[in-house]
Image (tube, grey):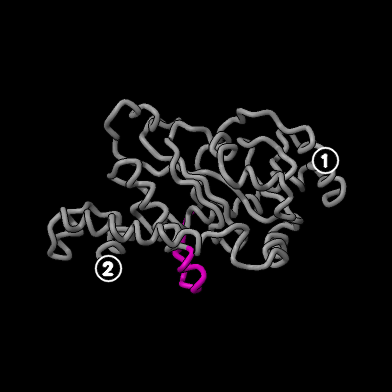
């Protein structure tokens, strides 16, 4: 069962192609992939934990080594997983900004490309920042539970715990702050995930099952990373940028200005 599921996750082949390779019928393959996906999903709280499997100081130091951005505990972004057209009244909710059906999956990663937080349940039409605001991690961060900040792209509102780029950096300090190299770690992580598991380029499944497969692949990605398995060569996977739909938090802007003055001047 595990080998059948891994073949599908890694190759993204049609179910009947996997069945031919394993000499099993399509129904058996479908049931097997479902069972293995749910088994892996049950391990999500063991292998996906925020801010990560390492100490706070190690997480911050590894991010700092990238481009000298201090106090970072994660980078956040969303990626679209293409799915087949779902049936039912909510079919339109899954049509994203590029006019194909998808689920929009939010991920947070550390500097070692380990996924530390995951939200895999939203239709493709839902904006990245709306997913973030509805997430459990968004509720926890303002409470001071974690000492550090996330980095996000310009589609997110600047918050005291989420640093976003300036729209028009003028000074050398502002340009240094805007350096995208640290923030791009999440794009690298998504690229690694989709390269390891080709099925995530197009899941011919219902939204719920597509989300379960995505979670299963994410758990496997973290297991492979923790075991230091060889990473595939990847081309950077960059989803399109969404315009912000929420205004910056005033205190968030003040924190961003302090970052620029204290660390990048």
Q: Position of residue 56 (x, y in %)?
A: 70, 63
Q: Nearer the viewer, residue 5 or 264?
A: 5
Residue at 78% across / 42% down in the picture? 256
Magenta residues (range)? 222-235
Asked whether 226 falls inside the magenta stretch, the response is yes
Disc 1 versus disc 2: distance between alpha carbons?
A: 52 Å
What quarter of the picture does the N terminus occupy? bottom left
Q: Which mark is residue 3?
A: 2
In screen coordinates, is 213 left or right of 44?
Answer: left
Magenta stretch mostly in which secondary structure? loop
Q: Find residue 139 and name its label.
A: none
The residue at the point 33 percent across, 53 percent down is: 199
Give the side of residue 9 with respect to residue 56, left or right: left
* 194 and 162: which is toward the camera: 162
Q: Nearer the viewer, residue 140 or 209?
A: 140
Q: Is residue 210 a member of the stretch shown in magenta?
A: no
Give the residue at mark 1: 257
Give coordinates of residue 65: x percent, y percent. Answer: 71, 63
- Image quadrant assignment for residue 194: bottom left
**Taking 245 as reference, is 247 left or right?**
right
Q: Give the mark nearest the N terminus, 1 or 2.
A: 2
Relative placement, left or right, of 243 versus 83 is right
Quick check: 123 above or below 12? above
Helix, strand or loop status at disc 2: helix
Viewer-nearest of labels 1 and 2?
A: 2
SS for tag 1?
A: helix
């Amino acid at each position: 069962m595990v080998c059948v599921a891994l073949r599908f996750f890694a190759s993204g082949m049609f179910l009947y192609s996997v069945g031919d390779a394993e000499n099993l019928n399509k129904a058996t393959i479908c049931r097997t992939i479902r069972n293995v996906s749910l088994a892996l999903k049950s391990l999500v709280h063991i292998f996906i934990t925020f801010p990560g499997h390492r100490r706070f100081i190690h997480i911050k130091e590894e991010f700092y080594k990238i481009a000298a951005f201090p106090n970072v505990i994660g980078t956040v972004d969303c990626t679209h997983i293409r799915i087949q057209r779902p049936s039912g009244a909510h079919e339109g909710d899954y049509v994203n900004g590029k006019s194909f059906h998808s689920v929009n999956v939010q991920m947070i990663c550390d500097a070692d490309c380990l996924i530390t937080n995951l939200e895999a349940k939203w239709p493709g039409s839902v904006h990245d920042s709306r997913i973030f605001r509805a997430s459990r991690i968004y509720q926890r961060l303002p409470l001071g539970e974690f000492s550090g900040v996330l980095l996000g792209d310009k589609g997110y509102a600047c918050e005291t715990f989420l640093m976003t780029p300036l729209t028009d950096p003028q000074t050398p300090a502002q340009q240094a702050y805007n350096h995208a190299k640290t923030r791009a770690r999440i794009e690298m992580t998504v690229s690694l995930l989709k390269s390891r598991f080709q099925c995530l380029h197009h899941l011919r499944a219902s939204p719920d099952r597509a989300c379960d497969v995505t979670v299963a692949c994410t758990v496997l990605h973290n297991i492979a990373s923790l075991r230091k398995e060889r990473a595939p060569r990847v081309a950077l996977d960059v989803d399109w940028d969404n315009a912000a739909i929420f205004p910056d938090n005033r205190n968030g802007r003040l924190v961003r200005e302090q970052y620029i003055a204290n660390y990048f001047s």
